[in-house]
Image (tube, rainbow, N blue to C red):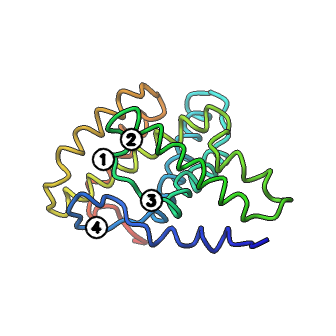
Amino acid sequence: MDNNFFALISRMRYIERWSLMRNSIHENVQEHSHMVAVLAHALGVIRRDIFGVPCDPDACAAVALYHDASEILTGDLPTPIKYHDDEIMSAYRRVENLASAKLLCMLPEELRGAFEPILTGETERENHDIVKAADKLSAYIKCIEERKAGNNEFINAERQTLAALHAYNMPELEYFIENFIPAFEKTLDDLGGMD
């Protein structure tokens, strides 16, 4: 048996995102997964500590770290293609499931039980919802960063992504947007440092 799992995970950095758009700031799947994990953890903490709803932020972060792991084997299919119709979505989901199963088989048997629910998406429903929201929130932040860099190509995506975020109707997401998104408009000097 080959224990290639972690070596393949490290290759997430070679999978580029947003391939159909002109990017001022390039983003790979590894960078994206890290940001989604940070955001999922934050949303989980907000859900638990601000709104008093039971949640495991650490589990949300773990799911987020691996949420695009299958793309190491499949590549990143652009959103307009992936969600074009139900038939394509269903076929792509099957391919993702096959890729996740292949990755899982690259772990020693003793470790598979811990990784299987994370790789297959069969975790607590709350984790799935938070990770999905964090994934979309990461896309929104990417749009803000591109606009700030003078790239108007992301303006429509920014507007559409914000509308999609509001459609989730998640209090923790609205809390994050209201309290933390304005800081993404600031410069490094405005954000402050060690002064």
Please give left or right for residue 166 compared with residue 111 in the image. Answer: left
> What is the CA distance from the residue labelled 3 to the residue labelled 2?
21 Å
Residue 1: image quadrant is bottom right
Foreground pick, 15 / 181:
15
Q: Secondary structure at mark 4?
A: loop
Tell which circle, 3 or 1, labels the residue nearer the N-terminal end.
3
> What is the CA distance from the residue labelled 4 to the residue labelled 2?
24 Å
At x 35%, y 49%, the residue is 139
Q: Secondary structure at mark 2?
A: helix
> What is the CA distance from the residue labelled 3 to the residue labelled 4?
12 Å
Please give left or right for residue 145 compared with residue 72 in the image. Answer: left
Identity, as a three-letter code, of the amino acid under mark 2: Asn
Q: Are marks 1 and 4 in contact (CB under 8 Å)?
A: no
Q: Secondary structure at mark 3?
A: helix
Look at mark 4 in the image and give the residue it sits on: 25
Foreground pick, 17 / 48:
17
Tell which circle, 3 or 4, labels the residue nearer the N-terminal end.
4
- Residue 173 lies, with reference to residue 34, above or below; the image says above
> What is the CA distance from the residue labelled 1 to the residue labelled 2?
7 Å
Identity, as a three-letter code, of the amino acid under mark 3: His
Residue 157, percent from left and from top = 23, 45
Q: Total number of numbered labels?
A: 4
Q: Are marks 1 and 2 in contact (CB under 8 Å)?
A: yes
Foreground pick, 165 / 107:
107
Tell which circle, 4 or 2, labels the residue nearer the N-terminal end.
4
Tell which circle, 3 or 2, labels the residue nearer the N-terminal end.
3
Look at mark 2 in the image and give the residue it sits on: 179
